[in-house]
């Protein structure tokens, strides 16, 4: 695993940690900011998590295992993407961690993803995760 190619992106969301946590762990909300992806999980440590959808006309099914689930604080899972073209083997799984920190009435959300094989892969993942966090922020900050 290359420590050099770790993605880290953060954003401050004008929403409570409870609201941000709900958006990270509610399939109906996830679908709204994660490229229309359907997420299936029991939402318990040790349970599987599956991401299904279609991207640019290609069906995908990505998966992982929830490693840590501390409500309103940390959501950590392994993650393997069928789109990367790598075999479904333990060494090809990444670890994705969402960390939530209250900041007044807002929440600082930080996402890290390890095990990116190349600088190009890391930059691609960073671009994707930045897009995801921006969409999540927009979803939660929309004014009624």
Image (cartoon, grey):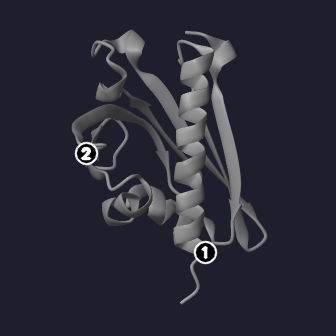
Alpha-carbon distance for marks 2 and 1?
A: 26 Å
Of residues 105 and 55, the one nearer the viewer is: 55
Residue at the far front in the pictured view: 56
Vertical arrangement, residue 83 with respect to residue 119, above or below: below
Is residue 98 visible to us here?
Answer: no
Q: Comparing marks 2 and 1, which lies closer to the viewer?
A: 2
Residue 106 image offset from top left, x and y in percent: 71, 69
Q: Residue at x 33, y 14 (%)?
A: 86
Q: Residues within 10 Å of mark 1 (few under 14, many from 20)?
A: few
Q: Which mark is residue 54?
A: 2
Please state the horizontal and vertical placement of residue 17, each as a whole percent of the image: 61, 65
Label annotation for residue 141: 1
Q: Is residue 89 visible?
A: yes
Image height check: is 35 above or below 57? below
Horizontal arrangement in the rendering, residue 64 relative to residue 67 (left or right): left
Whole-percent x and y of residue 55? 31, 43
Total numbered circles: 2
Quadrant of residue 91 within the rendered picture: top left
What residue appears at the point 58 percent right and 19 percent down from the top-left corner? Answer: 120
Label 2, residues with CA under 10 Å away: few <14, some 14-19, many ≥20? few
Image location (x, y in percent) of residue 83: 32, 28
Q: Is residue 15 above or below residue 73?
A: below
């Amino acid at each position: 695993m290359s420590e050099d190619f770790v993605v880290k992106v953060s954003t401050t969301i004008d929403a409570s940690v409870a609201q941000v946590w709900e958006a990270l762990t509610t399939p109906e909300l996830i679908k709204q900011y994660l490229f229309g992806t359907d997420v299936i999980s029991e939402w318990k440590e040790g349970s599987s998590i599956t991401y299904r959808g279609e991207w640019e006309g290609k069906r995908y099914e990505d998966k992982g295992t929830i490693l840590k689930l501390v409500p309103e604080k940390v959501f950590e899972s392994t993650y393997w993407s069928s789109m990367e073209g790598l075999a479904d083997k333990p060494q090809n799984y990444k670890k994705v961690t969402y960390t939530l920190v209250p900041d007044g009435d807002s929440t600082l959300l930080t996402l890290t993803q390890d095990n990116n094989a190349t600088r190009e892969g890391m930059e691609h993942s960073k671009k994707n995760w930045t897009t995801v966090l921006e969409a999540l922020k927009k979803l939660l900050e929309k004014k009624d």
